[in-house]
Image (tube, rainbow, N blue to C red):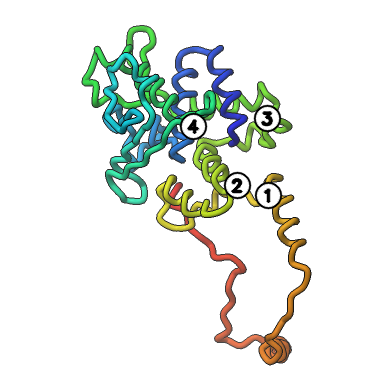
């Protein structure tokens, strides 16, 4: 899932019912924290992961001072947003991650979460404890409803259909899933190079390189970079003569019972289901 898709999704949601608008904000907010869908919406089979409530989202201004949820100027004053993941599939509790304003229209974690919280404060908070409201809640027809994972999938796939996703984003409708939010965040950081692997693990709360299962190695944005890097290596000398000769002689021997073989790349089991 790409930032271009997210922008179009947000635009499309503004022409749809309230559930789609709230869902769009949740997806945008979840993307910048590489969230699992079960962390911000209701799923068909709830697991160990605790869904976020309003108490798990905290804002701070440019001086790092707390900005209350009911502050009428929340959206203009907030510079940072911190999300606390109370319980996760990896077993870590009360883990926090923070993001600051991106400065990019629509694609901003602070704006997305401020929109979610402001909507909840205005419509849902008067009817129940303000700190215990699931972030996926919204008011419709006089009652509180929660966004379902099926609605998250519906909005993402609808965006692909309306905007010809296969040609515009390189993603077909059926390739999109709720995991696309988490994998899209990992890919966005991976394409930056440098120490992106460490950033991905930190943001997505991965405890190993299991995030590699989310990386698509065939994206066009990598193709030119790899070719240019490979072309810079004009020549190289193999100085392992004896080792090479030994390897050749061993290659002629039949396999032995104790021989072990390793995959070219290790197989990692992701924490995500």
For label 1, count other residues whose C-alpha is less than 10 Å away and answer few (under 14), some (14-19) or many (20+): some
Residue drawn at the location 31% of the way across and 33% of the way down:
64
Does residue 57 appear in this view? no
Secondary structure under the numbered disc 2 in the rendered image: loop
Query: Which circle's residue, 1 or 3, is located before the other in the chain?
Result: 3
Looking at the image, is mark 3 or mark 4 earlier in the sequence?
4
Q: Closer to the camera, 117 or 73?
A: 73
In what element is the residue under mark 1? Answer: helix
**Residue occupied by mark 4:** 102
Mark 1–mark 3 distance (CA, rounded to whole Å): 20 Å
To which residue does mark 3 refer?
165
| Among the two numbered marks 2 and 3 on one chain, the one whose residue lies closer to the N terminus | 3
The answer to whether marks 1 and 2 mark residues whose Cβ atoms lie closer than 8 Å is: yes
Q: How crowded is mark 3: few (under 14 residues within 10 Å), some or many (20 or more)?
A: some
Quadrant position of residue 140: top left
Farthest residue toward the top?
141
């Amino acid at each position: 899932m790409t930032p271009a898709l997210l922008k179009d999704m947000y635009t499309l949601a503004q022409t749809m019912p309230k559930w789609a608008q709230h869902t769009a904000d949740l997806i945008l907010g979840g993307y910048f924290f590489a969230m699992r869908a079960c962390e911000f919406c209701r799923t068909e089979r709830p697991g160990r992961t605790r869904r976020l409530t309003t108490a798990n989202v905290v804002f701070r201004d440019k001086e790092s001072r707390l900005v209350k949820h009911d502050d009428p100027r929340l959206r203009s004053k907030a510079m940072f947003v911190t999300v606390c993941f109370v319980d996760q599939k990896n077993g870590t509790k009360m883990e926090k991650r923070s993001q600051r304003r991106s400065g990019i229209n629509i694609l901003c974690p602070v704006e997305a979460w401020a929109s979610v919280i402001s909507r909840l404060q205005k419509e849902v908070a008067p009817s129940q404890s303000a700190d215990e409201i699931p972030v996926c809640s919204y008011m419709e027809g006089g009652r509180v409803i929660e966004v379902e994972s099926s609605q998250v999938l519906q909005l993402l796939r609808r965006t692909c259909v309306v905007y010809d996703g296969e040609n515009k984003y390189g993603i077909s409708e059926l390739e999109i899933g709720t995991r696309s939010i988490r994998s899209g965040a990992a890919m966005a950081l991976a394409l930056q190079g440098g120490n992106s692997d460490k950033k991905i693990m930190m943001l997505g709360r991965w405890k190993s390189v299991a995030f590699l299962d989310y990386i698509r190695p065939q994206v066009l944005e990598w193709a030119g970079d790899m070719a240019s890097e490979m072309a810079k290596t004009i020549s190289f000398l193999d100085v392992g003569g004896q080792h090479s000769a030994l390897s050749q002689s061993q290659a002629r021997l039949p396999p032995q019972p104790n021989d072990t073989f390793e995959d070219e790349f290790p197989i990692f089991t992701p924490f995500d289901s």
